[in-house]
Amino acid sequence: MAHPLLDLFPEGTTVDPDGTLVIAGCRVDDLAREFGTPAIVVDEGALRARACEYRTALTSRRPNARVVFAPKAFPATAVQRVMVEEGLGLDVAGGGEILSALRAGVDPALVVMHGNAKTTEELRIAVEAAIGLVVVDNADDVDRLEQLVAPGSVQGVLVRVVPEVASSTHPSVQTGQVGSKFGLTAAAARRLIARIEESPLLEMRGVHAHVGSQIMDPAELAAAVEPLAALGTFPVYDLGGGLGARYTTADRPASVDEYVEALLAAADEHLPADAELIIEPGRSLVNGSASTLYTVTTVKRDARTFVAVDGGMGDNLEVALFGQRYEAVLAGRLNDEDAEDVVVVGRHCESGDVLIDPLRLPAARVGDLLAVPATGAYTHTMANNYNGYRRPPVVFARDGEARAVIRRETWEDLFDRDV
């Protein structure tokens, strides 16, 4: 019988007869020997398939629509390159993401730039790169753009709107409610739209809304369409992203098809038929394609059983920030029976450095490999050097072959910025 957590790993993940996990044709013990631990392992085939699923689900139903990947979820140039090769645009937030997108080979016309506090430098990078759409969040964005756009040139813009949609996600990732730091209420948006329409340097292309992240019910995301429609008729309506990803066996996010159907039903009801629609998936596009490998460093059986690994909040802040629940397996012992309830903790000097609590495992031993599925979103993004931690590599695996697309930091890297 298959291990109950196996379907949290990328489709096609298997278990060798000796109980060792195999991701994209690569045994995890071989990956650990070659690349060390911790390591973020991406099933490249699964990543490409998910990008294709999104693109096909949207454009097969509405040809005048496009998917742009939000690389804040996994800001690796190699991941962005996959998205570009699979026909997606990119939704960037900040100068570094713009530069990474260009390195990945994206057509600048297919880039959408976000940010509630864009600097002049970042806007200059966007204008000089001929980014297709800049989403203005406030009047200061407009002031800066009008100073940066050369006479005779025009920069396309969208206005970010607060759709006044309360979502059921964690408060830290809600963005569509009144009082959000992102976007403008309808009255303020109308004033800014009128100003942009009078500008000789800016082209008012449309409006944008984003309800939040890790939202399981697509109806909450589709609810943003009507408030956008109420602002007027435009060539472009950007409906944001936010579809939830599966982290545990209990999670039941909507499928991509269900999500797209909900958005398009609302669009058909409220928006012009010839308008271009944009969606911006991030977490739900990349999360399921990646897993993190750790090595067990200590096992302490006392008041509770603590299984400590060689990573933690230095490579996964999601638990500390949002209380995100993960699952894990002893990746070389999937044939063993579960024997104990444990707390999986990290190596950092914080009581909050807890990865999974509780977790049922076979009796863990020092040197065991622990594999945590569904770590493609916001782990590499927020990796840090707490306690002198070296950020882990990102490894692409496909058809039994593996390669590092981001190397592990060295000790010397920790001091590169010393002056």
Image (tube, grey):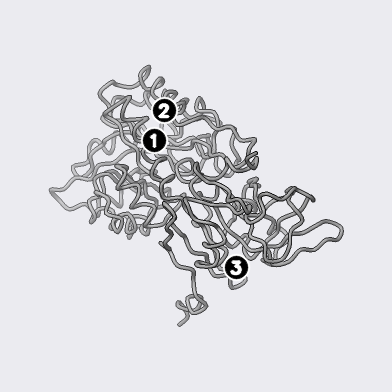
Looking at the image, the residue that sits furthest to the top is 269
Residue at 32 percent of width and 60 percent of height: 121
Q: Which residue is mark 1?
A: 54
Asked if 224 appears above or below 368 in the picture, the reply is above
| Residue 217, position as x, y percentages in the image | 54, 28
Which comes before the other along the chain, label 3 or label 2? 2
Q: Which residue is mark 2?
A: 260
The kind of residue on which mark 2 rests is Val
Tag in front: 2 or 1: 1
Q: Which residue is mark 3?
A: 386
Looking at the rendered structure, the secondary structure element under dot 2 is: helix
Q: Mark 1 near mark 3, Cβ–Cβ under 8 Å?
A: no
The kind of residue on which mark 3 rests is Tyr
Q: Examine the image and state in which quarter residue 279 appears.
A: top left
| Residue 276, position as x, y percentages in the image | 28, 30
| Residue 392, position as x, y percentages in the image | 52, 64
Tag in front: 3 or 2: 2
Q: Residues within 10 Å of mark 3 (few under 14, many from 20)?
A: some
